[in-house]
Amino acid sequence: MAYQLKISLDGSSKPPIWRRVLIPDKFSFHELHAVIQAVMGWENAHLYAFRPLGRRGEDIGIPFDDGFMEVETQDARKMLIQSQLTAEKQKIAYEYDFGDGWSHTVLAEKINDEKIVAPRCLGGKGACPPEDCGGIYGYYMLVAAVNDSKNPEHEDMLEWLGMEEGEQWDVNGFELEECQQEIIHYQQYT
């Protein structure tokens, strides 16, 4: 069996940032995390959690004890997605980087009998924000600063992103072929 999932970055607009993937049903949540990292353009530099109920509680991620947060975390490496995503139109929350709080909605668009071995990106829209820019609100402030030479943060943000004067951040930037190449290398995250 195969899952067609739509992964949407919550709070994104004009354009909404999303990716559509096809993954085998035997994938663990950790493998799904790796696919999301690849297709969204994240760098796998932070903790993550899947939340079947959409809120903190029984997280699925990499168990850790920070002595501060008492959250039950089930091991994502041992839990298959088919244990939680059992029907089409079902949603699960995914958060990456608890500091910036990149919240995503993972929607099971289709569950079918297609036999696939490796994940594929089927489509998407919108450029993924860079790591550590302060969450979705920080991202839009960054875009405004980069794309407006009169913004007082303009030069600092260009430098931080490694962009040249006159370059613009393309919020629509998404290349399916580039995404396919990233997903081919998804195993580096697992």
Image (cartoon, helix red, strand yellow):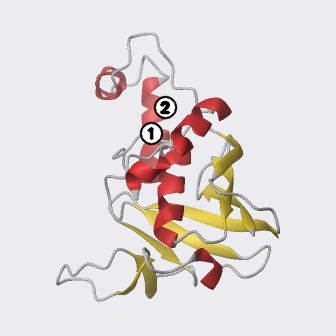
Residue type (three-letter) at the residue carrying disc 1? Met
Residue where numbered disc 2 is placed: 144
Res 133 visible: yes
Looking at the image, can residue 84 be seen?
no
Residue at point 63%, 53% (across, down): 119
Q: Residue at x 72, y 82 (%)?
A: 86
Name the disc covering residue 50, or none.
Answer: none
Q: Count residues near mark 2 (Cα–Cα under 10 Å), then give few for <14, some for 14-19, many for 20+.
A: some
Q: Which residue is mark 1?
A: 141
Q: Three-letter amino acid code at disc 2? A: Ala
Query: In x, y percent, where is residue 165?
Result: 39, 10
State the image coordinates of residue 79 (x, y, percent, origin top left): 50, 80
> In terms of secondary structure, where does tag 1 sit?
helix
The picture places residue 147, in percent across and down from the top left corner, at: 49, 23
Name the secondary structure under disc 2: helix
Q: Nearer the viewer, residue 111 or 15?
A: 111
The residue located at (58%, 31%) in the rendering is 178
Whether residue 87 sits left or right of residue 105 in the image: it is right
Tell me the distance, in whole angstroms, between the alpha carbons under discs 1 and 2: 5 Å
In the image, residue 50 sits, relative to residue 96, either above or below, namely: below
Quadrant in the picture for the C terminus = bottom left
The correct choice, above or below, for 127 with respect to 168 in the image is below
Q: Are marks 1 and 2 in contact (CB under 8 Å)?
A: yes
Decide which of 39, 120 is in the foreground and name it.
120
Give the residue drawn at x 46%, y 43%.
139
The N terminus: image quadrant: bottom right
Q: Is residue 81 left or right of residue 107?
A: left
Query: Residue 72 at what x, y percent from top left?
Result: 37, 89
Graded by Cα atoms within 10 Å as few (under 14), some (14 to 19) or many (20 or more), the crowding at tag 1 reads some
